Amino acid sequence: MNVLNSIFIFALAFLAVFAEASFGTFRRVLGVQVDLLPGLMIYASLSTGVWTVAGVAVLGGLWFDSLSANPLGTSILPLFFIGFIVQQFRHLILRDQPYAQLVIGCAASGLAPLMALAILASSGAEPMLRWGFLWQWFVMTLVGGLLVPLYFRLFDKVYRTLGYQPVVESSFRQDREIARGR
């Protein structure tokens, strides 16, 4: 199921970037372009290995940058940093708790644009920073955090549908009496 897991994550990363570029309803209503990839990086880093995390960071970052105004490669480092840090500490994270998923998703969704902004500023670009940036950052953080538990539910439903649970059979029965005698 590990290969299938990685394939589904890559496919959802591609669809997430496509949805961000194609559907601008959320952007028109609130004035914010929500980034769906940091939340997906949280799921990928808690569910797969480092190679899948690196692949999603590189491919997802390139896909995102190719359809946005960012210079190519700007989003790769923030996504990889988020995925790698969560990957290193995943044994400490309560993976199945929606509250933990929400908190880590909010942290990742808030950190990714700040890191991308720092990369843009250090490369000599002049990003437009106004008071509206705080509103955009707040909404991106909140919506990105709320999406992480939805990613976990979506993938759990997909794996319950397509996967199987191995049956462990034992010759021991709970209701059996053992007759001991001499």
Image (cartoon, rainbow, N blue to C red):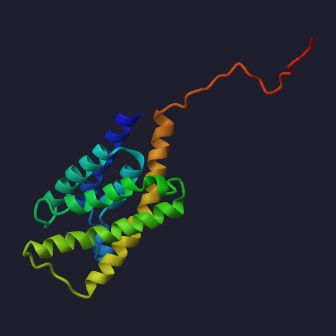
Q: Quadrant of the N terminus?
A: top left
Which residue shows up at 50% across the image and 62% down it? 100
Q: Position of residue 74 (x, y in %)?
A: 16, 63
Q: Position of residue 168 (x, y in %)?
A: 61, 26
Which residue shows up at 67% across the image and 22% down it? 170
104 vs 171, left or right, is left
Residue 39 figure quarter: bottom left
172 lies above or below 54: above
Residue 61 figure quarter: bottom left
Which residue shows up at 44% across the image and 46% down it? 155
101 vs 40, left or right, is right
Q: Nearer the viewer, residue 127 or 25?
A: 127
Total marks shown come to: 0
As drawn, the residue found furthest toward the left would be 124
51 lies above or below 93: above
Q: Quadrant of the C terminus?
A: top right
Q: Position of residue 79 (x, y in %)?
A: 27, 59
130 vs 147, left or right, is left
Which residue shows up at 48% across the image and 57% down it? 93
